[in-house]
Image: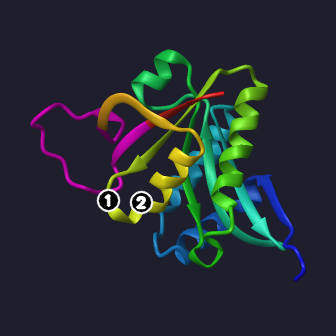
């Protein structure tokens, strides 16, 4: 069996349609503004957007925020991996782990001692939950967040993409 050629590249202005196409393949289309904002933040040095490809075909993407919205990470200077997605046909090949390791290397290279990641709480995030733990991420100890704001005891929030457990890893 021939080995696959896996490449990770930083997105650029030419990547916009590729990113939109990836979300359509994941049956989770994003608003165009999502990627316009991400690429604008990349131009400002606040975020990096990466696309992972297998044998030249785009298979997923993630973002690394150097200035995360989550107040704890922001106050402690912890960069955050965000919006990690792999096309279903390419899952279970180590691509998500590869993107995470890539981001960890960049963060470590800039002298940071920790990196963060958030994960959704419903069953559709089960594989991600397990992967993050296997890669050494642990809950940050502050409970769950909704749109990166801590949910207080007794507060009701929908179980959707904005409800997350924030995790951290020492590098």
> Does the magenta portion include 60?
no
Query: Of all residues shown, which one is farthest toward the left?
Result: 154
The disc placed on residue 100 is none
Residue at the image position 62 percent from the left and 40 percent from the top: 64
Q: Is residue 54 left or right of residue 171?
A: right
Q: In which quadrant of the rendered view does residue 143 lie?
A: top left
Quadrant containing the C terminus is top right
**Vertical placement of 110 versus 144: above or below?**
above
Q: Is residue 153 left or right of residue 114?
A: left
Q: Which of the two residues, 96 or 76, is positioned nearer the viewer here?
A: 96
**Vertical placement of 6 versus 104: above or below?**
below
Residue at the image position 24 percent from the left and 55 percent from the top: 159
The disc placed on residue 122 is 1
Q: Secondary structure at mark 1?
A: loop
Query: Of all residues shown, which one is farthest toward the bottom?
Result: 1
Q: In which quadrant of the rendered view does residue 5 lie?
A: bottom right
Query: Of all residues shown, which one is farthest toward the right?
Result: 2
Residue designated by label 2 = 125
Percent position (x, y) of residue 111?
Answer: 73, 19
Percent position (x, y) of residue 7?
Answer: 82, 60
Residue at the image position 9 percent from the left and 36 percent from the top: 154
Boundaries of the magenta span:
145-166
Q: Secondary structure at mark 2?
A: helix
Residue at the image position 56 percent from the left and 19 percent from the top: 77
> Does the magenta portion include 156?
yes
C-beta proximity under 8 Å, tags 2 and 1: yes
Cα–Cα gap, marks 2 and 1: 6 Å
**Badge 2: few (under 14), some or many (20 or more) residues near its Cα, within 10 Å?**
few
């Amino acid at each position: 069996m021939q080995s696959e050629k896996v490449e990770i590249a930083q997105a650029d202005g030419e990547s916009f349609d590729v990113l939109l196409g990836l979300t359509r393949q994941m049956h989770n289309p994003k608003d165009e503004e999502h990627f316009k904002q991400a690429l604008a933040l990349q131009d400002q040095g606040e975020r990096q957007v990466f696309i992972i490809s297998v044998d030249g075909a785009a298979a997923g993407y993630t973002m690394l925020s150097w200035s995360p919205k989550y107040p704890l990470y922001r106050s402690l200077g912890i960069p955050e991996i965000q919006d990690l997605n792999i096309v279903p046909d390419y899952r279970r090949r180590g691509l998500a782990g590869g993107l995470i390791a890539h981001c960890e290397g960049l963060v470590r290279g800039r002298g940071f001692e920790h990196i963060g990641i958030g994960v959704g709480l419903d069953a559709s995030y089960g594989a991600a939950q397990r992967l993050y733990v296997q890669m050494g991420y642990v809950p940050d100890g502050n409970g769950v967040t909704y749109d990166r704001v801590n949910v207080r005891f007794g507060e009701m929030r929908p179980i959707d993409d904005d409800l997350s457990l924030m995790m951290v890893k020492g590098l």
